[in-house]
Amino acid sequence: MDLPISPGLLISLIIVLIAIVIISKGLIIIRQSEVMVVERLGSFHRVLESGINIIIPFIEQPRAITMLRYRKMGEEYTAITTDETRIDRRETVMDFPGQPVVTTDNVTVRINGALYYQIIDPKRAVYEVENMSQAVEVLAKTTLRSVVGKMELDKLFESRAEVNNEIQAAMEEPASKWGVKISRVEVQDIAMPEEVETAMRLQMAAERKRRATV
């Protein structure tokens, strides 16, 4: 024989169920080195730090940040864009594909670089720029062309550390407006046209022969 459920008990069960749903949606655990930007009714409210945090469901919502990453598949790089609500504050490396750059002596070289950066102000990274990681990448590429474009090819090979430091210094101010700290920039590989590389090898061989003769 089934026992009838009183209206009061049914209401209590519904309230308990609603409370469980609200708690499950409002309870957020942020891991170490991560933060989350939270909006209330569409406006910035606060930044959640690592640990246990509680938000008001349906009224407060996390704001996602757009991140661009490259994944190497064979010999080619594939760009992957994701929207992430948890912002990683650790130092991140961006290994972007080789870029064609023209030196002052009109030699086109292809430079592959790596950029190390860190988000220090999550609010600025979300609200001051549409796509923070893409903006940092474009800034790095344009700065690289500007710095290398003022050098001759021989000087470029001799002064990699100088190029790295100059690119980093030029990027610091605009990147800081986006809440990003540029840790360092590394020029990894410089690829030259085959005829230029051959000419340089012949030049080096001739120089060694001259020194041996002396």
Image (spheres, rainbow, N blue to C red):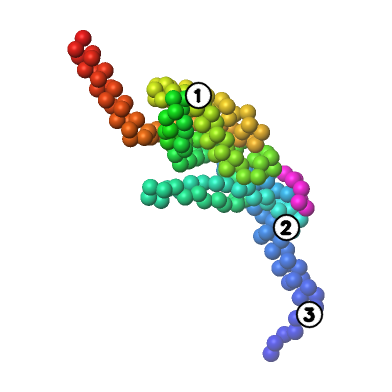
Direction from residue 9 to residue 95 in the image, left or right: left
> What number of labels is visible?
3
Q: Residue at x 64, y 36 (%)?
A: 179
- What range is drawn magenta here? 40-46
Tell me the element at label 2: loop
Q: CA distance from mark 2 to mark 3?
A: 30 Å
The quadrant where residue 198 appears: top left
The quadrant where residue 48 appears: top right
Q: Tag 3 or tag 1, which sits nearer the N-term?
A: 3
Q: Residue at x 56, y 38 (%)?
A: 138
Query: In which quadrant of the rendered image does the N terminus lie?
Result: bottom right
Q: Position of residue 95 (x, y in %)?
A: 47, 40
Q: Residues within 10 Å of mark 2 (few under 14, many from 20)?
A: some
Q: CA distance from mark 1 to mark 3?
A: 84 Å
Q: Position of residue 126 (x, y in %)?
A: 66, 43
Q: Residues within 10 Å of mark 3 (few under 14, many from 20)?
A: few
Determine the residue located farthest toward the bottom in the rendered image.
1
Direction from residue 108 to residue 41 in the image, left or right: right
Tell me the element at label 3: loop
Q: Tag 2 or tag 1, which sits nearer the N-term?
A: 2
Of the pair 12 and 137, the residue shown nearer to us: 137
- Nearer the observer, disc 1 or disc 2? 1
Q: Position of residue 190 (x, y in %)?
A: 40, 32
In the picture of the structure, the residue carrying the numbered disc 2 is 57
Q: Residue at x 65, y 45 (%)?
A: 130
Q: CA distance from mark 1 to mark 2?
A: 55 Å
Q: Residue at x 76, y 55 (%)?
A: 59
Label 1 is placed on what type of residue? Lys
In the picture of the structure, the residue carrying the numbered disc 3 is 6
